[in-house]
Image (tube, coloured by chain):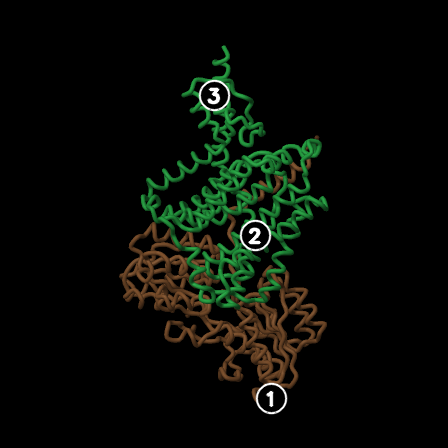
Chain colours: A green, B brown
Amino acid sequence: MSGPETGLAAPDAGSAASPVPPAPRGDRLVSRVARVRELGIVAALGLLFGFTGVVNPAFLSFDSLRDILLNSSIVAMLAVGQTLVVVTRNVDLSVSSVVGLSAFGGALIMADNPGVPVPLVIAGCVLLGALCGAINGLLVGVAGVPALVATLGTLYTFRGIDYAWAGGRQVNAADMPGGFLSLGSASVLGLPLLALVALAVVLVVGWMLRNLPAGRELYAIGSSPEAAVLAGIRVRRRIIAAFVANGALAGLAGVMWAARFGTVDATVATGKELDVIAAVVVGGVAIFGGSGTVYGAALGAVLLASITSALAVLRVDALAQTAISGALIIAAIVLDRLLALRVAAALRRRRYRDAT
Amino acid sequence: MTTRTPWRRMALVAGLALMATACGGTTKSDVAQQTSAPAAAPASSAAADPNAPIKQGLKIAFLPKQVNNPYFTTANTQGIAAAEEFGGQGKEVGPSEASASSQVSYINTLIQQKQDAIVISANDPNAVVPALKQARAAGIKVVSYDSDTAPEGRDVFVNQASAEDLGRTQVQLLAEQIGHKGKIAILSATPNATNQNTWIDFMKDELGKPEYKDMELVKVAYGNDEDQKSFTETQGLLRSYPDLAGIISPTTVGIAAAARYLSDSPYKGKVKLTGLGTPNQLRQFVKDGTIEGFELWNPGDLGYLAGYAAAALASGQITGAEGEKFKAGKLGEYTVGADGEVLLGKPTVFTKDNIDDFDF
């Protein structure tokens, strides 16, 4: 979505566009809106909210929207991290285990040492996540193990460490300081704190990917690893950095998890990695690297959370929910692709018209 | 350059992710499977001698569904304590993951170690039976607890609470809290969790009685024993039924998630919540008024009783036939029921008055 007028020589992240010739001002605005890569997913969200809201207006109430934001915050944070890895044509399956390790570790330290400062615990969890990410990054970037295999291995390793550490213990809401638990439920200006943290993560990482040379290089690596090497990009270092950043975000998501749910044992977040990857893919990030934005990935997370909430509100039969939820995800992707194709065709026609 | 390999790999991940996003987890083993199939009479080779003393130095192994599970940790700690009481040795071994076949190799090892008794909570009622039959052929007594095996796999099943008691008492508990009036919902684990469905059937049966004529069960929701899904389903219930009076959640994950949601929502204390949970997990919510009372059997007592049942079998006090009696330390005397079942007793109700007496 980089506009031609910004003057940046950066490769385009979202749409596969060639330079657009100057167009009349109104036209340009329309085409810029139409070319926002995330349009499809916004449309899918609109349809979902419209339909559910008509059947049960309570779904559109402020409390309900707030709940949906809260429900999607953690997955959105993880989806942002995952995007960093996926655009480099890698994947990190171990995120759920990093979340589990961080959530349990943080909770246990608070339960065993009453009075330990909460910011210190949060920082420790982020560091722990970054360390896990560094292990993934070294395996993939330096040892050259395919990301799918390396992170599948660490998925089990990290979870195993978690099990061994936990030794069957469960940390409950009553064991954690109230100030920490309120991080998971507090509101600032009516918006849940957790959602604001997620939003900040999305905006900061989004800006960095779009504007910093390092961010652009991640896309270059994903587009063509060989070309990236020839272009002098330090591929290894960038890939490790992407994994470390993703790990740190997973660590942050882990403490948030503990604050939000209040009951933590060694099995926290088991299986969540697939939700995260689904959010990334639904959000229009190419799974084979090189394109996509964190905004899309975060919207993907919101869409997935909204689908689950909508099905709960619509009183859909529980046995059918899983299948319907899967079908809705596929429908959202198809809608997204159709819109993208139509927009591309319309833009081509306009360019042709402008040229003649 | 070639994109073939990455393409395939990535497409696989994408496909997997899409298919599995909405996939539910399995029922956590906290709440047990209650499949007591009609039994063949237990094969008792020797007659029972109720007055036989408990043998000294009995080696008893506890094999839970998975280690690292607080519920089983509590149960087995008490079981091991029971073994020490009667002069034996107890130990806990088991898989870190509750899958159907994971317990077989542990059983084989225990046979080689010549244990006197195995106390097992089966991940799968049938998968462990061949291995347990070998153990019994080798003279090892088998007690199932928490989750039964097929009857030919064990001598005695120590049942934590009957499905009927659990189903009915949860309805009674909620009815008291809401004054026998209003719409209620159930937040269960997965739609195909056998134990949950059995309890829910008894709840519906109980609700059919005349004293509950003003109560209406409007929905059974399923949180899949996942924190997030249980949260979302609780939100969904409150949105769909704004006049909901109470929720029963017969699963530890579900009740904790529902309590956490209610505790910072405007519904706190207005929508009553009860079900099955552990005191440690729900202490906070009982104290802050989100939950008035909930219930559960005492897993420590369950492990303790199973330990004594194993010792009684290994010492020849009982063989697993109906009507035999044995003493279980501080818990008193128990009688073996039909199909070799020993019932722990009615569930305990936890309220703010007694919750601090329990630590599990």
Question: Are labels 3 and 2 assigned to the same chain?
Answer: yes
Say which quarter of the image contains residue A31: top left
Q: Is residue B290 left or right of residue A5?
A: left
Dot 3: few (<14), some (14–19), or many (≥20) neighbours within 10 Å?
Answer: some
Q: Which residue is mark 3?
A: A346
Q: Is residue A52 left or right of residue B54?
A: left
Q: Could one spot residue B192 in this view of the protein?
A: no
Chain for mark 3? A
> Circle 2 sits in a helix, a strand or a loop, which is it?
helix
Q: Amino acid at mark 1?
A: Pro
Q: Amino acid at mark 3?
A: Ala
CA separation in Å, label 2 and label 1? 52 Å
Q: Amino acid at mark 2?
A: Ser
Dot 2: few (<14), some (14–19), or many (≥20) neighbours within 10 Å?
Answer: many
Residue drawn at x 48%, y 24% is A342
Q: Which residue is mark 1?
A: B53
Q: Which residue is mark 2?
A: A96
> Circle 3 sits in a helix, a strand or a loop, which is it?
helix
Residue drawn at x 46%, y 53% is B228
Q: Is residue A90 left or right of residue A50?
A: right
Residue located farthest toward the top when viewing the structure as drawn = A356
